Structures are given as C-alpha cells and as structure tokens.
Amino acid sequence: MTELLPDPVPAQAMGTAHLRADGPAKVTGLATYAVEHPADDALHLWLVQSTVARGRVTRIDPGAALAHPGVVAVLDHTNAPRLVADDPETTDPELLVLQDDRVAFRGQIVAAVLAETSDAAREGAALVAVRYDAEPHRVELRDDSPAYAPESVNPDQPTDTDDGDVEAGLAEADVVLDQTYRTAYEHNNPLEPHALVVTWRDDPDGPRVTMVDSTQGVHPVAATLAPMLGLEKDRVRVRAPYVGGGFGSKGLPHAPEMAAVLAARTVPGRAVRMAVTRQQMFALTGYRTATVSHFRLGARADGTLLAIDHQVREQTSALKEYAEQTATPTRMLYAAPHRRTRHRLVELDVAVPSWMRAPGEMPGVYAHEVAMDELAVACGLDPVELRLRNEPEVDPETGKPFSGRRLVECLERGAELFGWAARAPEPRATVDGEWWVGSGVASATYPTMTQAGSQARVQALGSGRYSVAVGAVDIGTGARTVLAQIAADALGVRVDDVDLQIADTDLPMATVAGGSSGTSSWGSAVVAAAQLFRRDHGDDPDAGVHTTASASQSPGMEEYATHAFGAVFAEARVHRYTGEVRVPRLLGVYSVGRVLNPVTARSQLLGGLTMGLSAALFEESYRDPRHGHVVTQDLATYHVASHADVRGIEAVWLDEEDPHVNPMGSRGIGEIGIVGTPAAVANATFHATGVRVREIPVTADRFVD
Amino acid sequence: MRELAYLRPDDVGDAVAAVSGNPRAQYLGGGTNLVDHLKLGVTSPELLVDVRRLPLDEVEEVAGDDGPVLRVGANVRNSDLAAHPVVRSVFPAVARALLSGASGQIRNQATTAGNLLQRTRCVYFQDVTTACNKRDPGSGCSAIGGYARYNAILGASEACVTTHPSDLAVALAALDATVVVQGPDGERRVPVLELHRLPGDRPEQDTTLAHGELITAVELTAGRLTRRSTYYKARDRASYAFALVSVAGALQLDGDTVTDVRLAWGGVAHRPWRATVAEEALRGSAFSEEAVLAACERELSAAVTSEESAFKVPMVRNVSALVLGRLAKEDR
C-alpha cells in the first residue's frame, strides 16, 4: 500500500448535481438497516437499566426472567464474559459493560436478557429483579459546582489559551460587555436508533465476530471493540450498509453495542439482534452537555474589539471524561489583541456525554454571536457592520494565513439576499398584526479537517468500468453519491462507470464520518488510489488489476488555517399575546470550498440550519435532579423542529474552491449549518421584542407578561 | 411476552358486557395512546375490546329541544370530524381544536371518544421507573418538584398536578357538549364538563365513567354562540406539541355589550377548565381587551404555580384576550 500526495483533480462530475444514489432504495423501503438485516435463528437482546444514579448492585435475581417462556439467558456483572481492561490506551470505561457492580449513572446497563423473541426479551428484562446499595448522587450543573480543568478539550485541543492581557484590554475599552449565556442539554436523536445484529463464532483459527451495525464508522467500531474483546481488529467484521443518521452519536460504539457483542459471545454461532429504544437513547448513546459561557468583550467606541474573554463551564461524566471544546471557535473568529479562553468541567454522576453535531462550535459560537449582537447594540452599530470591523488579517490563534476566509462576502451577500438594509435599527420597532417582527444575524465557522489513515482501492472491471472501494459509511450525507463523482473525475470516466463499494471493514480502512471530514478524508484516498492506478496501469488496464493507496496530507493544511465560514440571517416573529416564536425566513450563505454535489450539499446545509433552528427554539433534555436521568425521553416531550416550524429556508454558497486542503478543493459541510443559526434566531427575537434571552432554547414563556 | 385476549365485537351491548365483566379489560379505539402504554408498561390489561367495528362512525344532524343537534359517533376519526362541513361552519372551535392536535397521521387514526379519554402525557406517568399516583396509586407524585413546565395551575391536588392533554375536550367544554354513554344498565347522558374530574385524592380516575361504560356519541347543540367560536393553542413548536395553554371561546355581542360568552382553558388543569368566574364577570359588561384580562385575573386568583409553570397565568389570560378579541372583530 502506497501513500502519495494526490494532484488536484479537474472537476467534471464534481460540482454537478447528482441525485442521491441510494434514494430510490430508501424511499421504497428496500434499503436494509442494521436491525432489519436477515439472520437465521437470531436471538433478541433487551437491556436492563439501573434505577439509581450512583451506588452498587448488591443482588440480581434472574429467576423470574429465566422462568419466562422464550428467555434463554440473563447476563449481569457476575456472569458476563470478561473484557480486557488492563491497557488504558484501548480501554474505554463507557464500554466496560457488566464488568463490575458499580453504578455510575441512572440508566446504566446492569443486565441484559437474551430470548427467542423480542417480546420475551423485553418481558424478561422487566422481570429481572435488581437490588442496589444506593449512594448520594450529584447530577446538577450548578454555578457553584466544583469544577476542574481537563488536560485537553475534544479532540485534543488546549484547555486554556492566553494572548495579550485581557484585563488590560478591558480596562482600556470604551464599551465592556459582561454576560453569561447558557445552552441546554441536547440529545442527538437520529431517526434510526442505535441497532445491530452480531454473531460470535469460535472458528478453528480463533473467534470471529461479524456485525451489521448502525454506525458512523465500521473501521472505528472494529478498532475500538476488538482490543477490549482480546481480539485482533481483523477478527471483527463490521458492516453498515444504510444508516439513518447519527449526528455524532454513532461516531464511536456505545455501551449497547458492547452488551450485544458480550451476549453473542455466550451463544456462539447464533446471531443476536438488538435495537435500542428511543428512551434508552437518552441514557446510553451520548448527548451534548449543557454549557455556561461567561463572555467579556471590550471594544473601542467604534466597535473594534480589544479584549475577548470566554470562560466555559460544562459537565462531564464521572464514568468517562468528555470535554466539549466550546471556546475553541472564539480563538479564531475575530481579531482582538487581548484574548483568553477557559474550559472547566463539573464531574457528575450522569450518562456519558459525547459528540453532537458541531460539538464546541454550536454552543460556543451561539454565545459569542449573541454577545456580538449585544455589543453592536451597546456601540450603536449595525450587527453586520460590527463583524466587518473585527475581521482578522490572519488567524488570530496561529498567526497563519487562512486558506480562504470570505466571511465578509458571506455577510455582505447574505445581507443583500435577505434585504438587511431595510431593517429597523431599533429593536421592538415592527409590529405586524399580532406579531412583533425582527431579524438577526450571526457568523458561522467550522474547522476544515482531513483525517489521516483512510485508504482506497481501485480495480479495473473491464470494458472501461472500475470498482472503487473504501470502508467509509454514508450516514445519510450523500457520501455514496459524492465519492462516486470524485472517483469518476480522478479516473477520468463517467460516474456510471464507477462501481462504488463502502461500509464494510473488509474494504480498505476509512475514518469516521465525523468532524465534517469524511468526504475530504475518503475522497483524498480515492483520488490517490485512482491516480496511482493510472500511473501503474495506464488508461486501458486489464480487468482485475488493482491499486490500493492512501493520500498524504496536503501541505496546505500545515501552511494555512483551514476553516469553513458562513453567515446566517433569520427573521423571527414573536406573538404579542402568547410569546410564541416562529421563524418565517432563514438564510445561510457559506464559503465551503468547492461544493461537490449541489443536491446533497444543499440537504446537508438545510439540515444543519434546521437543527440549529431546533436548538434555538425547542431542544432541551430535562434531567430530573432527584432521579438523575432525563425524563423528557421521547420525541413527544423532547421537541425537535416539525415541518410547520421550517418555513422559508435557503442555503447558498460562494462559487469557489479551496486549493490548499485536498485534491477536490472542498471543505467539510456536515456541521457548519448548525453553527451560528441559534444565535441568528435568538438575536432576531431580541430585535423583534427588545427582550434579550441569554439561553437556548428561547421559549414562548420568555416573552409573556 | 404478556398474553392478552382481544375481542372485536359488532354490537355495543356485547362490547359493554365484555369490559364490564372483567376488571382488567379495556376498550381499544384508534390505539394512538393505549398502544404506547402497552409498550411502556403503563398499563397491562388482560382483555382488549376493540370498538372499531361498532356502528358508531356516523355524524348525524338531529332535532333537539334547544335547536339542531350534531350527533357525532364515538368512532368518527378526528380528521373526518375536523373536515365535516357542519363542524366547520357551526362549531368552528371544534374543527380548530381537532386540527391543532397531534399530526395528520394520528388524526386519521384517532377517534372522537378516544380523544376525550386519552391520558395525561406527564413524563412521570409514562416512565414506570418513577413514582406516579395516577399510574400506581399511593406511590407519590414525581411531577411535584420535578419537570413542571406542563403542570396544572388550577384544581391540582397534593396527589397529582398533571393536565389533561385533549384539545377537543376543551372546545367541547366551551360549547357545552354532551357525551352519550352506554353502560350495562342502559344509556345515560353526561355533560362533557362533568366527564373529566379533578384529581383530588383519586388521580387514577380520569373521568366520572364507571368501568365498562362506553362513550357512544358526542352531541353538540347548534346556536348563534357556537358559530362565533374559536380555539387557540399556544405552544413552542408550531405543530405536534401539546398545549402550553389553550383557549376555546365563544362570544355574542349586542353592540359592545357581551350578551353571552364561553371560555374554556386547556393545559391548566386535570380537566378542561371552564372559566365560569371570568364568563360571569364579562356577561353584560362592555367588551374590551382590558375587561377580558381583568375577568381572567379573577378566574386565575386561585392559581397555584411553581417557577416553571408560572408563565401559564399571564399566557392563558393573554390567549383568552386574543381569542375573544378575534371573535369580537368577527361580530362587529
């Protein structure tokens, strides 16, 4: 396998509209999702969850469950197969399922029931009697909760940064803004719950695990589970042909997957099938921590920033640390000589937080961009103008030039498209019947990343057709469609001549569909393999010849600061009698390099905008402090935006390519749509009403008196 | 797996006999609420009597003592009832209430009687790992001191602070509808205002119906007042959300003078709350927004709130002003 630096690819198919390759299969129900995967004689698994938030399991009585017809086995910490837990490099505490009697959070897996049918497994789970020695728990993120500084924040960024002298900058400032902004606990809630079918076989040459999983990365699942199972990675085969969304929650395996693999190990040769329930997803499959951002901005009277101070308090789990990188976008968004960021974590007896679409950027930019709106008001400036006045020449964090920073153009183009010039400068100035009407703006940014390690294989099939294989997963983003376009251009053939294979660990290594890095990472490998294939085998290769390659990182990634940018504009109407907030217009203008497929890209950006709208107005997980679990644990009580909430919504982009990040000229687009949107909506509600709400979701009760 | 028996009778008498004869039997209508409860373990009947084959799916106009009566069969689907031309023109509050509930798919499935008999969506009622007096009498009320945004502010008790989720019931309460009930000993008529009850010390009992009694129809008497009726549901999400508060109102003016008025509130109590104190204050007075707000303040003087539910007091007062204000504009 060769690594090479691919040449830029001339765009033919790239940049043109291609309908989603798997669309017909999905809308006709022919696409087979993980739990639907056929398996003869499969057993069903149901999880038993703790009903205390902290303590020990003192006794588990499986008797009634085992006596129930159809129940095959009850696994608990006394009889579950042992995992390898002696290597801190490979041991994930969240995945040490049923390994001891400790309960670290309410909803933790304390037993699992295997049965011949799903019904029997579920009833068996209800019959397992568990006794606890409960201990006092701490589950609330309070202003006075003791907090600590983690060693780094997700994924491996500095916890704190200091540039210049923030206090001196604030002292010198004509205008100082000092406010605190809060974001709610949020759960990812992909439409398809986490689910898998897994079989453990004790083959003559050793154990072999095969699974069809709902995941954002088949290779990462195998690489994570295998060492804890005492296996080499190649003994674990994972496939994920169709995935109904993940939003980060399927970025790495969670406890239910390990529980199913352990259960399968006890019944070698038989498949075990499990789908996590919606309620279980609120305890077992990750979520976004609530965040508290204390912002201090110091500016000259003309709005020029002198000091930016962003101090974050958020929550992690006692079981496993996760540090949301909430203040990291603050390090590069605007110019200011004096800058400081801090992250502090409160460790609680709660479920393990994890990635949720634009971790860090979503809550951090929300706080920053509402603070900027407040600063604009304090300086008597138009909020677009304030942002233009604080545009940095180079990346404030690294001093590197940007590979492309066209935030100003996004703001100006958006202002023009949105009709911003007609906006009343004062808040609470426009009434339309029963509604206050206002508009708001926010900047958006997301880092452009390419992850190392992906490989691709190109094989000639004869007659001008090619097989292109990469072990990536299409979680609904359109990767299956876009990778074929990239492969076609890299090979110089039509898209129809590419037979793309993905979503299987038997295919070359591919990194996770996360960090808006999938297309860039996998696409680079596809291009490298295609170009090496042509070099080695020419334009008229014999059928069967093949080449596998990976791409070395573009030198531009080191030389430049690489980020996507955007500007979001929102119109909000707030009902004068009820306080209800509706958003008739939402516009995002993006600078994301080359847009490889306008059809699937538009869906990604609109989806991000919608999820941002949803975060702005609805999404909130309520954790009951007495019990320790989230009680709004279904889609009737955890509100995501409905169709009726999404009215005028538009995503446009600048015509450009970024030559510095990958051979396609593209940046990642999966997450930037959610960034900035909550601030734009929140700012619009202020402009409508004159009432400043400093937390999301912005609910109707805030505007009623 | 829990086994349960399932019957699908063609005859009302057979259905009533089957449920009356088994304390662990329940009626199954559209199933949009009960099936959830079966899955969540909220209820575990041993017999389900499916009423959907009963001949209860007609909407008929019949003569009544006080004017024409619309008799709505218990099995009429929410979407069909909302679209019925007489409902739209003569009882607009009912049509609007129905259309503000649930989603299109659910309205296609849910029945008229089932809508009235749906149970609270209190998160603790639906979570069998927490205490709930309505689900498990005597176990305690987790909603007190817990997630309180949807809690009642009127008529609650120490045993239960939840609200009734139906939109339709609020509209019917404003329009003085009657439910027709078949029991083992015959038929009786119950004013819809007397169908649902306050929790008191028996929150497990949502209604005044005896076990086995079956709602066969809902009757609405048409009048000038019912034509001047409407419904407004306030909610964070524009669709597919239960009410923060809702208001059904009807108004009759003679010039500026209120000759008659109806005001019923949803999202504030264990049953649709007929705001009789406010109605009484408004009747005969000069109509104005201020008068409505003041009348509602009187009704709400008995409200008991927590920090999270306090918004409901100004919200239901404002929505009442909105609803009656809209009707006053129509009337002028």
Image (tube, coloured by chain):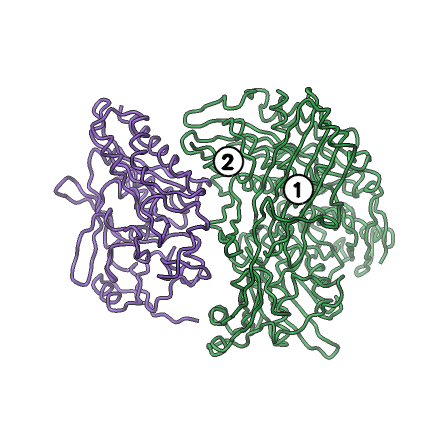
Residue A677 falls left or right of residue B243: right
Q: Tell me the subunit letter for badge 2.
A: A
Query: Compared with residue A148, is residue B323 higher up or lower down, i.e. above or below?
Result: above
Residue A25 falls left or right of residue B191: right
Residue A56 in percent (x, y) is at 58, 67
Chain A shade in the render: green
Question: Which quadrant would the C terminus of chain A be assigned to in this image?
Answer: top left
Identify which residue is drawn at 22% across, 66% down: B17
- Disc 1/disc 2 C-alpha distance (Å): 33 Å
Chain B shade in the render: purple
Identify which residue is drawn at 57% across, 47% down: A185
Q: Secondary structure at mark 2?
A: loop
Disc number for residue A647: 2
| Amino acid type, label 2 | Arg
Q: Is residue A495 visible?
A: no
Residue A166 in percent (x, y) is at 74, 32
User: Which residue, given by chain and number where applicable, does mark 1 sit on?
Assistant: A312
Q: Which of marks 2 and 1 precedes in the sequence?
A: 1
Question: Which quadrant would the N terminus of chain A be assigned to in this image?
Answer: bottom right
Badge 1 and badge 2 both on one subunit: yes
Residue A238 in percent (x, y) is at 68, 63
Residue B180 in percent (x, y) is at 20, 52
- Of residue B216 and residue A147, the one placed in the foreground of this image is A147
- Of residue B116 and residue B246, the one placed in the foreground of this image is B246
Disc number for residue B285: none
